[in-house]
Amino acid sequence: MIPLLKSKNKWKELIILLTFTLFCFSISIFRADYTNSRMFLFLNWNLFLAGIPWALSTLSVLYPSLGKDKRTTFIILTAWLLFFPNAPYILTDLFHLKHNLAMPIWFDLVLVLSFAWTGLLFGILSLLDIEKNLRNFMSARWTSLLIVAILFVSSFGVYIGRYLRWNSWDVLQSPFALFYDLSDRIIHPFAHPRTWGMTILFGLLLNMIFWSLKLLLQKRNV
């Protein structure tokens, strides 16, 4: 497996992501032990969910033959799109920051930002893999437009996860209730200004982050 990861330029990526994840886990455990509080331990589950789209896109990179089967490709891309919003979702966990006598707020800020950045990194790296795959089927311009759209759709996914409390599993567990909530906001957008306000602004933020990092990668390769 390691030679395969190295041949696909995924080994260093895996090591960095595992190191960041271990750091996040360690400081969350330290906080829980020091304060005798489980307050931020849930971030580890959120980070696990953020890693699923990276695992799916990496699978498609390691085994490109999977892309030759349309059914397998559809299943992987659908699962990836369902779980991708979990990556930027951790940014909204900053809402949990508050003054706490048991722990300095700067520590909690570093803790949440560490999880948020690692989650974003999982998402961005997986999106870069998906972008490469999409360019096998469409032009660079259409691929870029689709990436922009994916980031806005993901922003909508973050909203329904944060405020409507739906998660990726509910597509299978409660599809009809989920469809009702989503269709109501799509059919009557002006009745839900907060939904679309957050979706648009958060989507713009995600696009700023992704295309900024994309620009840095391009400058590095020049």
Image: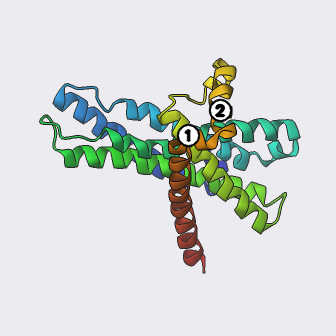
User: Is 197 in front, or is 115?
Assistant: 197
Residue 85, picture quadrant: top right
User: Is 173 in front, or is 199?
Assistant: 199
Compare marks 1 and 2 and give the one earlier in the sequence. Answer: 2
User: Is 83 in front, or is 195?
Assistant: 195
> Which dot marks residue 184?
2
Q: Secondary structure at mark 2?
A: helix
In the displayed structure, would residue 181 be above or below residue 132? above
In the displayed structure, would residue 27 be above or below residue 5? above
Q: Secondary structure at mark 1?
A: loop
Q: Quadrant of the C terminus?
A: bottom right
User: Which residue is outermost to the bottom?
Assistant: 222
Q: Is residue 54 visible?
A: no
Dot 1 corresponds to which residue? 192
Crowding at mark 1 (Cα within 10 Å: few <14, some 14-19, many 20+): few
Mark 1 and 2 residues: CB-CB less than 8 Å, in contact?
A: yes
> Which dot marks residue 120?
none
- Residue type highlighted by circle 2: Asp
- Residue type highlighted by circle 1: His
User: Residue at position x 87%, y 41% from top?
Assistant: 70
